Image (tube, rainbow, N blue to C red):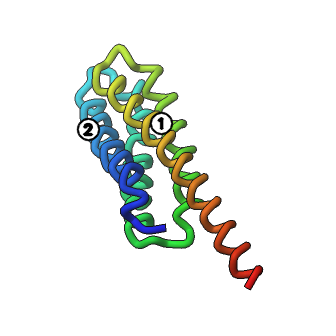
Amino acid sequence: MSHEAMRSCIDSCNECALECEHCASACLNEEDVKMLTRCITLDLECAEICRTATIVMARGSDRAADFCQFCAEVCEECAQECERHQHMEHCRRCAEACRRCAEECRRMAGAATRSKSSSATERAAH
């Protein structure tokens, strides 16, 4: 699958990484940082996973579907944590970006898996 076919997912991953980085930074400036430790940790992990997912997709890796499925799981976990703090604008925006990214990653992973299956079936038929 070409990276152009994954453009929407790549864009969502980039947006999510930016929101996660912003959220982590903003959390560090909150009054009760200790209460936000898990949020900050997940923000940073999610941002890194999203950036890596964009690289894997841009390269057209055969592992893109598997990696994007993992990315979706991390994004969901980050969204859940940020939603616990959605009274803070940065956490609310981060949770929204994570949910969108998780949805795009699951969609892309499913499309890539279907594409890989049909290619294998075609090769076996010849």
Q: Residue at position x 43%, y 49% from top? A: 45
Q: Which residue is mark 1?
A: 78
Q: Position of residue 55 (x, y in %)?
A: 38, 65
Q: Where on the picture, by quarter, is residue 77?
A: top right
Q: Which residue is mark 2?
A: 22
Q: Residue at position x 43%, y 46% from top? A: 46
Mark 2 or mark 1, earlier in chain: 2
Q: Where on the picture, by quarter, is residue 16?
A: top left
Name the quadrant of the C terminus.
bottom right
- Disc 1 residue type? Cys
Q: Position of residue 88 (x, y in %)?
A: 31, 18
Q: Mark 2 Cα within 10 Å, few/some/many (few <14, many 20+)?
A: some
Image-based side of 81 in relation to 88, left or right: right
In this view, the residue farthest toward the top is: 87
Comparing 16 with 32, the one in front is: 16
Q: Residue at position x 57%, y 60% from top? A: 112
Q: Secondary structure at mark 2?
A: helix
Q: Secondary structure at mark 1?
A: helix
Question: Mark 2 near mark 1, Cβ–Cβ under 8 Å?
Answer: no
In this view, the residue farthest toward the right is: 125
Comparing 43 with 117, the one in front is: 117
Q: Where on the picture, by quarter, is residue 119?
A: bottom right
As measured in the structure, the alpha-carbon distance from the residue carrying label 2 to the one carrying label 1 is 13 Å
- Disc 2 residue type? His
- The image shows a total of numbered marks equal to 2
Q: Residue at position x 34%, y 40% from top? A: 20
Q: Is residue 6 above or below residue 60?
A: above
